[in-house]
Amino acid sequence: MRMSQYFLPTLKENPSEAQIVSHRLMLRAGLIRQTSAGIYAWLPLGLRVLRNIERIVREEQDAAGAQEVLMPTIQSADLWRESGRYDAYGPEMLRIKDRGDREMLYGPTNEEMITVLFRDGVKSYRDLPKNLYHIQWKFRDEVRPRFGVMRGREFLMKDNYSFDLDKAGAIRSYNRMFVAYLRTFARMGLKAIPMRADTGPIGGDLSHEFIVLADTGESAVFCHKGLVDKDILARTIAYGGDLQPLVNEWTSLYAATDEMHDKAAFEQIPEGERLAARGIEVGHIFYFGTKYSKPMNAVVAGPKGEQVTVEMGSYGIGVSRLVGGIIEASHDEAGIVWPESVAPFKVAIVNLKPDDGAVAGACTKLYDAFKAKGVEVLHDDRDIRPGGKFADMDLIGIPWQVIVGPKGLAAGKIEVKNRKTGNREELPADQVVSRLA
RNA sequence: CGGGGCGUAGCGCAGUCUGGUAGCGCGUCUGCCUUGGGCGCAGAAGGUCGUCGGUUCAAAUCCGGCCGCCCCGACCA
């Protein structure tokens, strides 16, 4: 993409409404624009990040055996009356009427709808287990939306629902998601720690929140330091096998959010191993048994022909929230520092002198070579001074900056700067692409 | 929902107390100059001062209603 053509409105100053760093940087770097309280439009650069996060989530869900569907945002009130939640949910649910005066709602979650889809499509224990997910916009009319996309009213969420014949099966499903979540967040460059959670209004008796450590996090968290160093990506995962030992490895060390915190247990940990920090919830998984399947009559025929109410679990990842969460966890004074896996572009070519034929030619050549290798590349060919380009580039946080100017070029060198470390190396022009691709 | 704050040009703000021609910085546009970290000079465009009503000869400014946004708390992916 040529930056001179790109819709990328960056801001030099902080918008006054944005108080936390991720919100400020998302506005300044031209990722989003607010349209109402807690509702945002995604601009090209932000959308690319959102799509990358979605892609990782999707890949890990598929690998763990979940199947993607897509349910609508608008649901009928009758569906929610069936589970008894239409009246229970309260004003957080956005209720609307269609032209026929029928009561509808903008879905805050999809337990009811998925249960009906499952109920009508699956009749035998032979079809179990099933795990269905979708990535869809939700609306919760929060009392107090804030912190940009971290707590919006409209937000993109991956949610899925597992169906098993019995509790043991449901726990196997739970464990698969547990491991898939560890991998998902790790791939985004995040340290996400599973913490025993309160099951709250969704109900059930087994639940973990995945918390990203960040100084600006909303909640206080307490855990064993060893959890931070564990590396799930180094493990080979067999989703068909028994994942319980792996799950135990992550859950045996102490980790709890403020509301579940057990001070005495925490103090059992040797002092040097304790970690009291702040965190952002980016995922939440629940086993909730028959809470929905029972009232909504989601039953299958068992091996002996008996009717069995299925055991369910639900699993959520805040996809749009993750954009903010990643920035909270990865930024510096100059701007965003994107992990490569979610970066809107992997490489940015900084053309210091676009009207210099040799420089422009070298940039175009690099650009084409990166494209040929399938590398996402942004070419800053704008006719502005170098200072502005450097500032914008650091602000939007592209992992690799390839800096091409007349001085370096005359010496046959091109500078490659790593956004995260600030390291610079000078390379001959013909080695730049192979160094990064 | 309780408490607090704010709405003036694309962004950041002054002006409001004490009513009288709507301003500054950044950004934008034009020209020159400059070109390795938001350069310089000259010129220009851009605002029914959130909105509705009231007071007044006169309202960004005083009074009232409404709308919107932000922050703290309780609640939440």
Image (cartoon, rainbow, N blue to C red):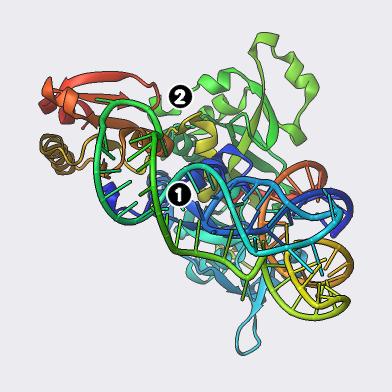
Residue A288 seen in this snapshot: yes
Q: To which chain does the residue with label 1 belong?
A: A
Q: Quadrant of the C terminus of chain A?
A: top left
* Viewer-closest of A224 and A113: A224
* Viewer-closest of A58 and A23: A23
Q: To which chain does the residue with label 2 belong?
A: A
Horizontal placement of A261 versus A228: left or right?
A: right
Q: Label 1 belongs to which residue?
A: A31
Residue A109 seen in this snapshot: no
Q: Is residue A12 above or below residue A432?
A: below
- Residue neighbourhood size for the residue with mark 1, other residues' Cα within 10 Å, grouped as few (<14), some (14–19), many (≥20): many
Quarter of the image where one finds residue A153: bottom right
- Residue neighbourhood size for the residue with mark 2, other residues' Cα within 10 Å, grouped as few (<14), some (14–19), many (≥20): few
Q: Is residue B8 above or below residue A283?
A: below
- Residue at 59% across / 30% down in the picture? A214
Kindly identify the amino acid type of the residue bearing the numbered disc 2: Asp
Q: Label 2 belongs to which residue?
A: A231
- Residue at 69% across / 39% down in the picture? A197
Look at the numbered disc 1 and give the secondary structure of its residue.
loop
Quarter of the image where one finds residue A434: top left
- Residue at 20% across / 40% down in the picture? A354
- Residue at 37% across / 49% down in the picture? A48
**Which mark lies nearer to you, 2 or 1?**
1
**Mark with earlier residue (2, 1):** 1
